[in-house]
Image: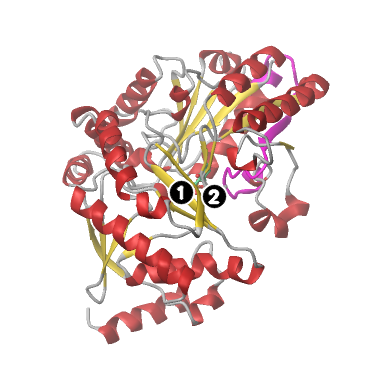
Amino acid sequence: MNTSKSSALILRSLRSVWHPCTQMQHHETMPLIPIVRGKGAWLYDADGRRYLDAISSWWVNLFGHANDRINNSIKEQLDYLEHVMLAGFTHEPVVTLSEKLSALTSNALGHCFYASDGASAVEISLKMSAHAWRNIGYSKKQEFVCLQGSYHGETLGALGITDTSLFREAYEPLIRAAHVVPSPDSRQARDGQTPNDVLQHALDTLQSLLERRANHIAAVIVEPMVMCANSMAMYDASYLQGLRSLCNRYHVHLIADEIAVGCGRTGKFFACEQAGIWPDLLCLSKGISGGYLPLSLVMASADIYSAFYDTDLHRGFLHSHSYTGNPLACRAALATLSIFEEDNIIERNRVLAEYINVALQPLAQHPDFHHFRQQGMIWACDAIINDSENTRTFAHRFYTEATKQELLIRPIRKTVYLMPPYILDTEEIDILASRIKRVADNVMYGV
Ligand SMILES: *Cc1c(COP(=O)(O)O)cnc(C)c1O
């Protein structure tokens, strides 16, 4: 595409497309980037420029763009069955996917309920929890607990357990509030405190809430290991073990939102495996289809499933979405799982992460950044900025400077993070590491 064609496309987009997570007026000064194709870790724009997709296109893309193996699976499926409703019907891709995912939990979570996006999976997990309690005679258990700074999606139910004021503020009167308890984010440690003190305080506070209120509480929802949208807050697996035992002790469900941290992102297939625990309900989306097609699901324990199993229709879980269990999306997910198996991805990512750790040392040592941290295939550090004007503009300036260096990086406030696809080669890692350092210098020193 020539430049005039691409600027025409940008104008048409700004007139007709309402872009997500965007104040549209900002595009009067910040240009949209029209992407025409992708291959591997790279996206190519209409003017022939390229961008290394260091955030996996909002954390969904695991094995690169236009991946041959996933492409071929979808193409094959397309000639058999593009879609069929999942009420009263079933099909091979959804069955095999459910079996494979259950097997990955050693059948601790043996029942998969499907939807299309992450927020819907979260809604489903909340409804399932409260409804399961109701079905077994505890209809007072209708409240939820989430962590400070949590993010679980932006539909109204999910906003109730999302403690992010930027996304909530305008809708506060529409939202049913949850109990918000301190998070184990290890960065909160203050003079003399250790990360373990922070973690213990978080568990103690939760315990006293449960002590008082457990007969009204259906579930605690948590993002295991890394609270991604909360500027990649990381914490120790022992928090999850403590959480699991509190939930057992006070008869409260544990919901693991693995929409961002699942699918190998933290170094195990499920982030809960880091702690050796299973939740009662687990939400998956984002990476599960390799970043190809909208797909989400909630995996439920036998106890929860059996609370609904009955002759009475009203005791069933009557929730549905039109594209529930879409065969093309399930086929993309199966191809994604095959790559995990055939290429031994979990093992390989350990080696890859080591290489990336070393390559990122110049950023880790950068005098203007602190809290450099890593978990599996997630890296983050925070810019040291004190005035609010610079804080407000930092993410935008960093993003813009990064695009000039052929990188797609979108900081969250002061936090610069990488969540790359699992297919970077050493040359791409070296490009990423050297240029991110250059971007950091340019932004902090105003070059
Ligand atoms: C992205 C995300 C969601 C919401 O998923 P959508 O597909 O954007 O609705 C929920 N929880 C977590 C942890 C997420 O990262």
In this figure, what is the number of numbered marks?
A: 2
User: Which residue range is magenta in the image?
Assistant: 132-158
Res 356 quadrant in image: top left
Callout 2 secondary element: loop
**Amino acid type at mark 1:** Ala
Q: Residue 265, position in %: x, y?
A: 39, 37
Please indicate whether residue 437 sits to the left or right of residue 138 in the image. left
Residue 157 among those drawn in magenta:
yes
Tell me the kind of residue under disc 2.
Ser
Q: Residue at x 65, y 39 (%)?
A: 189
Identify residue for label 2: 231
Q: Position of residue 163 (x, y in %)?
A: 67, 46
Q: In this image, 187 relative to 357: left or right?
A: right
Q: Residues within 10 Å of mark 2 (few under 14, many from 20)?
A: some
Do the residues under discs 2 and 1 have CB atoms within 8 angstroms? yes
Instruction: Report x, y in % for residue 6.
Output: 30, 80
Query: Who comes first in sequence, dot 2 or dot 1?
Result: 2
